Amino acid sequence: MEGFIRQILGWREFIRGVYWRDMPGMAQANHLHAHEPLPGWWWTADTPMACLRDAIGQTLRHGYAHHIQRLMVTGLFALLARLRPDQVAAWYLAVYVDAVEWVELPNVAGMTLYANGGRFTSKPYAASGAYIQRMSNHCQGCRYKPAVKTGPQACPFTTLYWAFLDRHEAEFASHPRTALMVKNLQRLSGPDRQAIRDWAEVVLDEHVRRCAAA
Ligand SMILES: Cc1cc2nc3c(=O)[nH]c(=O)nc-3n(C[C@H](O)[C@H](O)[C@H](O)COP(=O)(O)OP(=O)(O)OC[C@H]3O[C@@H](n4cnc5c(N)ncnc54)[C@H](O)[C@@H]3O)c2cc1C
Ligand code: SF4
């Protein structure tokens, strides 16, 4: 009953209202200063990351992925890898059979990328590879390890998650729903945090910057 009332009777109306209230600014919003280009493999699913290969491959084949694949696999990667909100929104609009801007854009810019600074979400949906491991069976067949933060075996989600917290520490430390994540970050030593920053650059070079779409 909760799913029916919230998702079908209420949520879509709410999202539609948000769209009309916040446009056209929502289309340009970039609260987290995300400027990396959309990688070309978002159009081919050619990536060694098993979870993304599956979610994007299914999307390209069927024009459909369920909510958690959109929010917590493709969307999560886009958030952590600082992909440009306008390019990410254009991708979601192009690939899904149900894509219409009034529902796609609030989900992408508002809910997934926190590009509007949390106008209608109480926190960014940031998580590490451990979340995907808990919720799916993708990690078993993946070349990366979700628990590893740095080095060639590190899961890119995990590296980028810690780098994301590190980058936004000041903002998220004062937010009641993200303060605990920041506390966990603050338990890491200075050298460990520097290693995460350095490895995050390697991950971005390999999976994003060198793969920009033509
Ligand atoms: C990044 C991103 C982009 C999205 N783009 C679109 C889009 O272009 N068009 C679209 O219709 N939905 C979009 N959604 C919302 C949602 O993912 C889809 O409606 C959903 O995948 C439908 O299938 P489901 O089985 O996951 O639905 P369930 O979770 O079972 O939900 C049942 C129904 O509730 C509605 N619903 C649930 N969550 C949302 C939501 N966040 N926003 C709006 N409606 C919702 C849908 O009508 C859905 O069919 C997007 C979500 C994200 C995170
Ligand atoms: S290890 Fe990381 S990249 Fe691989 S499937 Fe799991 S979450 Fe995805």
Image (cartoon, rainbow, N blue to C red):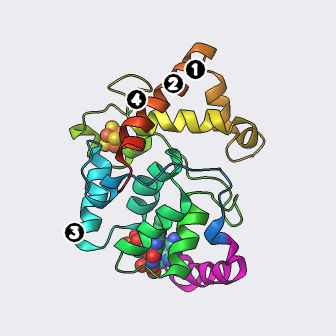
Element carrying mark 2? helix
Q: Are marks 3 and 4 in contact (CB under 8 Å)?
A: no
The residue that disc 2 covers is: 198
For the residues labelled 1 and 2, say whether their Cβ atoms are less than 8 Å apart.
Answer: yes
Residue type at mark 2: give it.
Asp
Residue 206 in the image, given as x and y percentages of width and height: 36, 36
Residues drawn in magenta: 2-25
Q: For marks 3 and 4, give the CA distance.
A: 31 Å
Disc 3 to disc 1, C-alpha distance: 40 Å
Would residue 1 be visible to someone looking at this image? no
Residue holding disc 3: 61
In this rendering, the answer to whether 196 lies above or below 137 is above
Secondary structure, mark 1, is helix
Which of disc 1 and disc 3 is earlier in sequence? 3
In the rendered image, residue 128 lying in the magenta stretch gets the answer: no
Name the residue rendered at 58%, 71% in the picture. Answer: 106
Q: Which numbered circle lies on residue 194?
A: 1
- Mark-to-mark CA distance, 3 and 2: 36 Å
> In the picture shown, does residue 154 fall above or below 208?
above
Element assignment for label 3: helix
Q: Nearer the viewer, residue 207 or 51?
A: 207
Determine which residue is flagged by label 4.
Answer: 147
